[in-house]
Image: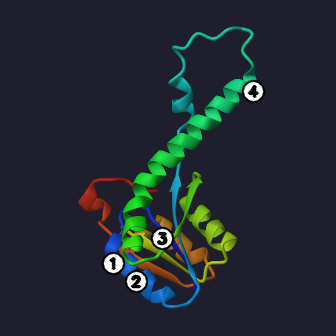
Amino acid sequence: MRVLVATTGVLPPTAVAEFCDLLVGNELGSITVMTVIQVPRTFLATLDDEERRSLLDDDSRRNEQAEVKAARYLEERGRRIVDPLISALAAKSRTASIRLVEGDDPAEAIITTAQDISADTIVMGATRRLFTEQAWKSVSVRVMDRCQIPLLLVPGSRIEDTGEIYP
């Protein structure tokens, strides 16, 4: 059993780790924990605006530095989101691979990652009530609508409760 856990940080780590442990059981399955981060490349580029640049500066060097910054941002932000779940899985003696995906469309990134790892099931959080008109725009419902593999939606803190905005 190959399980993909897609999280924005709202999933209860212990409960999800216990469920993944049950799903994988004694099989030689795998667990992949992923999150999708939108990297603000324009903002990151402005952090260097005060730096003096020579007309002789190589654009490829500047592009390399921008990519390094974007990768560092993705790693730092992504690890803060997935680490609680990785720790909860480790407490169950389960190792998981981590996928930190840069993207603007979380639903598409989740579906693509599920296909890439040949996932048998996806576990993800649902922060909106499923039976409202607004819910049909949510990431979890878009994945449910377009995905061809089983999907488990775990209720997380609702947007109204946290005050945070999820795409």
Q: Residue at x 40, y 83 (%)?
A: 19
Q: Residue at x 61, y 36 (%)?
A: 68
Give the color scheme: rainbow, by chain, secondary structure or one colour.
rainbow
Amino acid at the residue labelled 4: Ser
Q: Is residue 150 above or below residue 109?
A: below
Q: Is residue 121 above or below residue 65?
A: below
Amino acid at the residue labelled 2: Phe
Please give the residue where the numbered disc 2 appears in the rendered image: 19
CB of mark 2 within 8 Å of CB of mark 3? no
- Quick one: label 2, few (<14), some, or many (20+) residues within 10 Å? some
Q: Residue 79 placed where, x, y %? A: 45, 53
Q: Residue at x 57, y 27 (%)?
A: 45
Distance from disc 1 to disc 4, alpha carbons, whole Å, reads 46 Å
- Quick one: label 1, few (<14), some, or many (20+) residues within 10 Å? some
Q: Residue at x 51, y 86 (%)?
A: 24
Which is closer to the viewer, label 2 or label 3? 2
Q: Which mark is residue 15?
A: 1
CB of mark 1 within 8 Å of CB of mark 3? no
Q: Which mark is residue 140?
A: 3
CB of mark 1 within 8 Å of CB of mark 2? yes
Please give the residue where the numbered disc 4 appears in the rendered image: 60
